Amino acid sequence: MIGSESLYGRAKVSIPLMRPARLRPCLPGLALLATGGCSLRGAPSFPVVGAYFPDWMVCGLVGVATAVGLRVLFLLTGLDALLSFRLFTYVALGVIAALGVWTLVFGP
C-alpha cells in the first residue's frame, strides 16, 4: 500500500465516529426521556403472599402459555403445516393474548 490507497488502487474512506464527548450534554435529557413513563402513584403491581408481583409478568406468562397451547393445538389439528411464518404467527398470537389480558384485567 502506498499512501492512502488500498491494495486495489481505491482510496480509503474514513467515516467519522461519534465521540462520547459530544453526547455528554444530551445525557440529562435522555435520562428524563427514559423516566417519562413513570408515575407518582407507583408501579402497576398487586400483592401475592405479601410480595408485590408486577402485572406485566402475569400478562407475559399468559401470552407465552397461549402461544405454546395454540402451537400444540395447531400441531394436533394439522393447521401448523399450513402456516408460512410459524414463529411470527405464534409470537403475534401470544402478544395478542397478553395485551388482551392487560386490557381486560388491568385496564381502565
Image (cartoon, rainbow, N blue to C red):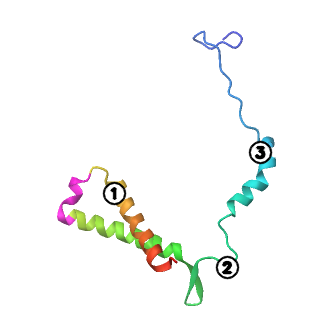
Kindly identify the amino acid type of the residue bearing the numbered disc 3.
Leu
For marks 1 and 3, the one nearer the N-term is: 3
The amino acid type of the residue labelled 1 equals Thr
The quadrant of the rendering that contains the N terminus is: top right
Please, what secondary structure does the residue beneath circle 3 have? helix
Tag 2 residue = 41
Are the residues at dot 3 and dot 2 in contact (C-beta closer than 8 Å)?
Answer: no
Q: Which circle's residue, 3 or 2, is located before the other in the chain?
A: 3
Local secondary structure at mark 2: loop
- The image shows residue 9 at horizontal and vertical percentages of 60, 9
Residue under circle 3? 23
> Which numbered disc, 2 or 1, marks the residue that appears first in the sequence?
2
Amino acid beneath label 2: Arg
The image position of residue 67, as x and y in percent, is 35, 66
Q: For residue 13: magenta?
A: no
On the image, the x and y values in percent for residue 55 come to 53, 76
Of 86 and 29, the residue lying toward us: 29
At mark 1, the secondary structure is helix
Image height of 67 relative to 16, above or below: below
